[in-house]
Image (cartoon, helix red, strand yellow):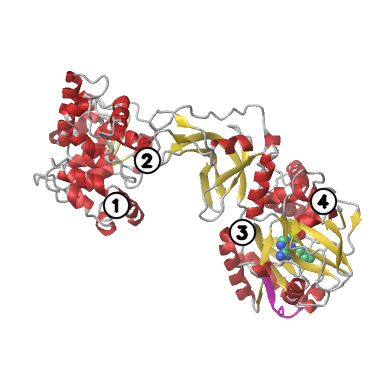
């Protein structure tokens, strides 16, 4: 993407013009463009700035000053040019535009109308004696294409007006979100590729002639030729009276505002409603309301001087699909998730997006490496809509579908659209038991994947607590389970019963708590019963747990209550000392790492050589410190082993104390077990 902020040379300017012309051509043809709306706007702004400084160099095909960037045309002349709108991108720009208009008029504007900028295609609908005669695209503003064939699929565009008038209604045709979803269902059922976004779908649908299926669209009227001399708000009411749909039927309804401040407020309100609207808007339009103000302000060749579009950030962005991950939900549903090259959409960096299900991936024809349209609005989970097939390089790779459950390794039931582990909910049980038994948690040797599957299948175990009630007879009844393996497994389970509280708690796999956090929670509460009784407030007292995380943990604890009760009744995880006071170990001695925020990097040597990173972190926490993985201003100590790289450099830059593994081992010697 070009640096649109400034164009430094005639060649960069010419290049920018060529890119913009190409993008506008694709946008106005079928809505497919490799450039997002925000990037296009930025490019045109850069072109405008260059032209302001070098008026002698303006290229004839420059998109500035032209309706539709000069891209579209047609053979039906418009009676009155169909103009576009100038854009502003902030409240400040809107304010200075309004002040400019008032200066031009030499008086305050007599009220504003603020309304949604509908993200569709502008059309003119010609009526004679109240009957719809012809539907025309905007084209280049002077002439458009006849698209009358599409008129009967457009809701809100009456075939017959309520009065027998000769008039031309103007407005926007779009696909609402429901219409877009339905359109894509119909298209895929007919073997066609789904539309990438509603605007693209509206453009394609209006132009298409002989389709074997019907796609419904929606019209919103916001202007007319032949109903002059009405204030804009009155015109909108008149359009509705005549039977046309207007934005008055929506939550983002047009509103008369007496002052620019009130208009700004309505702009903010409409912007805040955006995510909840059942159709797309790409901005808010602010219009001088009175006919007198409009007439006096007049129009330029591209846009009226009495109206402006306050653009909102694009909700569709183009980025690259890097990978697809398969995640197993609580009910065993195996859902694909797109891993994306991070992209900023409306102020949020999007790295993951939902892909619904495998059939959906196939329907959309996605490949790894594709440039894709990603949609994000409000709190909606971002989703990948479609690939930009024209942008393919040939290096794209097919998406690999899993042939076994990525969580428990058992088979996949692919008979429905949404794939599911054949174990359904008990996939979770197998996975949670495998997790609980693993080395870093309860370290139960002999309880690997196959054994966990066997125990769940035989209905002997549904959760971690059930492990502690297993009997010798039950285990001997299992396939390939001899006396020795049985005794070994029971022995390992007995050892686990006496594991310290933090390990037992960690074995539960509570969301939001890893090993370090489990250690802190165990130290804070001291017993499983106290953890079970914790509420969000008490949890938030634990170092590193904020209000949000506390809520998540409380919900998880509620979910796990039956398991916690069983563990408490079975005396599992009681092998822990009373919680230590801050800065002291359990015996009351000052902890060597009290108040220290410690990061470990490089390979450990000497006494610490055999410790995994997790065991190092446990050691730090045991010795009263806080372990973290990244060096920051808060870090007070770096343990730097062999081949320590960027973390060491950063710590040096920040003046953080650095110790070798040997010196650190001396410091925490009494905690090395
Ligand atoms: S007024 C002379 N009002 O935005 C008045 N346009 O980017 C010109 N649009 O060409 C248009 N919602 O296609 C107007 N409420 C609205 C609009 C609107 C969407 C479109 C229209 C226009 C384009 C400019």
Q: Is residue 481 left or right of residue 361?
A: left
Q: Quadrant of ligand 1?
A: bottom right
- Foreground residue among 40 and 248: 248
Query: What's the mark number on residue 70?
Result: 4
Measuring from the top left, give residue 342's x and y in whole percent.
Answer: 53, 42
Secondary structure category for the residue under label 1: helix
- For the N terminus, the image quarter is top right
Mark 3 Cα shell of 10 Å, populated few (<14), some (14-19), many (≥20): some
Q: Residue at x 67, y 38 (%)?
A: 388
- Foreground residue among 303 and 270: 270
Q: Does label 1 or label 4 sit earlier along the sequence?
A: 4
The boundaries of the magenta stretch are 106-114
Q: Which residue is mark 1?
A: 558
How many discs appear?
4
- Quick check: marks 2 and 3 in contact, CB under 8 Å? no
Secondary structure category for the residue under label 2: helix
- Quick check: marks 3 and 1 in contact, CB under 8 Å? no
- Quick check: marks 2 and 4 in contact, CB under 8 Å? no
Q: Which residue is mark 3?
A: 278
Task: Measure how far apart labels 1 and 2 are at the Cα level.
Answer: 45 Å
- For the C terminus, the image quarter is top left
């Amino acid at each position: 993407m070009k640096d649109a902020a400034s164009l430094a040379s005639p060649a960069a300017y010419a290049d920018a013009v060529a890119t913009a012309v190409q993008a506008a051509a694709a946008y106005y043809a079928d809505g497919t463009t490799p450039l997002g709306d925000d990037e296009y706007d930025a490019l045109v702004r850069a072109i405008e700035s260059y032209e302001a400084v070098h008026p002698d160099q303006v290229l004839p095909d420059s998109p500035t000053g032209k309706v539709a960037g000069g891209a579209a045309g047609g053979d039906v002349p418009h009676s009155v040019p169909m103009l576009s709108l100038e854009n502003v991108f902030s409240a400040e720009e809107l304010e200075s535009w309004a002040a400019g208009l008032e200066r031009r008029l030499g008086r305050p504007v007599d009220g504003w109308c603020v309304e949604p900028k509908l993200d569709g295609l502008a059309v003119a609908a010609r009526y004679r004696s109240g009957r719809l005669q012809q539907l025309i695209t905007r084209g280049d503003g002077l002439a458009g294409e006849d698209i009358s064939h599409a008129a009967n699929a457009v809701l809100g565009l009456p075939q017959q007006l309520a009065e027998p008038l000769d008039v031309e209604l103007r407005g926007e045709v779009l696909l609402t979100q429901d219409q877009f979803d339905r359109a894509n269902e119909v298209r895929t059922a007919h073997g066609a590729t789904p539309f990438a976004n509603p605007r693209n779908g509206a453009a394609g649908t209006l132009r298409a002639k002989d389709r074997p299926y019907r796609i419904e669209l929606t019209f919103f009227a916001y202007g007319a030729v032949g109903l002059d001399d009405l204030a804009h708000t009155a015109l909108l009411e008149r359009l509705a009276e005549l039977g046309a749909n207007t934005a008055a039927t929506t939550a983002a309804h047009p509103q008369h505002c007496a002052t620019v401040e009130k208009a700004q407020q309505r702009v903010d309100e409409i912007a805040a409603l955006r995510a909840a609207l059942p159709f797309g808007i790409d901005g808010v339009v602010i219009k001088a309301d009175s006919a007198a103000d409009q007439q006096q302000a007049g129009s330029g060749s591209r846009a009226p001087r009495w109206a402006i579009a306050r653009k909102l950030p694009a909700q569709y962005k183009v980025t690259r699909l890097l990978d697809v991950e398969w995640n197993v939900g609580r009910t065993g549903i195996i859902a694909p998730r797109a891993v994306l090259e991070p992209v900023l959409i409306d102020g949020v960096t999007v790295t993951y997006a939902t892909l619904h299900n495998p059939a959906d991936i196939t329907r959309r024809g996605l490949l790894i490496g594709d440039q894709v349209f990603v949609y994000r609005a409000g709190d909606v989970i971002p989703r990948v809509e479609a690939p930009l097939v024209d942008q393919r390089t040939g290096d794209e790779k097919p998406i690999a579908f899993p042939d076994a459950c990525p969580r428990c390794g058992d088979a996949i039931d692919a008979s429905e659209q949404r794939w599911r582990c054949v174990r359904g909910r008990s996939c979770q049980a197998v996975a949670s038991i495998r997790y609980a038994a693993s080395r870093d948690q309860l370290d139960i040797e002999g309880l690997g994947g196959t054994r966990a599957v066997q125990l769940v299948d035989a209905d002997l175990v549904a959760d971690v607590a059930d492990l502690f009630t297993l009997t010798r007879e039950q285990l001997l009844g299992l396939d390939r389970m001899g006396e020795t393996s049985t005794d070994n497994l029971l022995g390992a389970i007995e050892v686990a019963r006496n594991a310290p509280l933090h390990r037992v708690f960690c074995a539960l796999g509570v969301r939001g708590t890893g090993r370090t956090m489990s250690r802190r929670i165990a130290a804070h509460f001291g017993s499983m019963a106290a953890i079970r009784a914790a509420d969000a407030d008490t949890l938030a007292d634990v170092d590193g747990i904020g209000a949000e995380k506390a809520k998540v943990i409380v919900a998880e604890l509620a979910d796990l209550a039956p398991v916690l009760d069983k563990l408490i009744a079975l005396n599992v995880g009681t092998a822990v000392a009373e919680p230590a006071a801050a800065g002291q170990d359990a015996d009351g001695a000052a902890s060597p790492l009290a108040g220290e925020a410690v990061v470990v990097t490089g390979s450990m040597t000497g006494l610490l050589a055999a410790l995994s990173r997790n065991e190092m972190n446990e050691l730090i926490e045991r010795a009263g410190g806080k372990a973290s993985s990244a060096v920051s201003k808060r870090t007070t100590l770096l343990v730097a082993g062999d081949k320590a790289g960027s973390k060491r450099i950063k710590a040096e830059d920040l003046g953080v104390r650095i110790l070798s593994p040997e010196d650190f081992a001396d410091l925490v010697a009494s905690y090395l077990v």
